[in-house]
Amino acid sequence: MLDSEMKSVIAENCGSYETKFKIVTMSVGRLSESCSNCINFNGDKCSKGLFNEMKDIISIN
């Protein structure tokens, strides 16, 4: 799975996902969920430490 696809799958299944772009989302419509668009994801790292845990779970399934 490509990195961008993995980030989308993780974001769609993450209970802590919260978009960085609330105003854009409200005015334009739904922005695709991805770790890259999450307030908890900075510098390719999840500040809540959920990325690797979610990635491992998704990889098993």
Image (cartoon, rainbow, N blue to C red):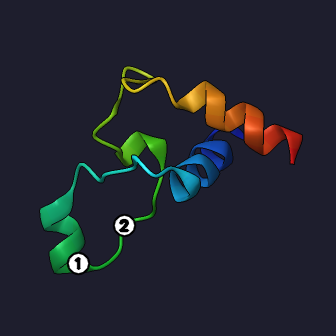
Q: Position of residue 21 (x, y in %)?
A: 21, 56
Q: How many marks?
A: 2
35 versus 52 height, above or below: below
Residue type, label 1 = Val
Q: Observer-nearest residue: 59 or 24?
A: 59
Q: Does dot 2 land on a helix, a strand or a loop?
A: loop
Quarter residue 60 falls in = top right
Residue sitting at x 66%, y 49%: 5
Quarter residue 4 falls in = top right
Q: Do we see residue 1 in this rendering?
A: no
Q: Position of residue 7 (x, y in %)?
A: 58, 43
Question: Could you say which disc has been placed on residue 2 in the image?
Answer: none
Q: Observer-nearest residue: 58 or 29?
A: 58
Residue sitting at x 36%, y 23%: 47
Residue sitting at x 39%, y 49%: 17
8 versus 3 height, above or below: below
53 versus 29 height, above or below: above
- Crowd band around label 1 with a 10 angstrom C-alpha radius: few (<14), some (14–19), many (20+): few
Pointer 1 residue:
28
Measured in 3D between alpha carbons, the distance from the residue under mark 1 to the one under mark 2, in whole angstroms, is 8 Å
Q: Position of residue 25 (x, y in %)?
A: 24, 69
Pointer 2 residue:
31
Q: Does dot 1 land on a helix, a strand or a loop?
A: helix
22 versus 40 height, above or below: below
The reply to whether callout 1 and callout 2 are in contact (CB within 8 Å) is: yes
Q: Do we see residue 55 in this rendering?
A: yes
Q: Residue furthest front?
A: 15
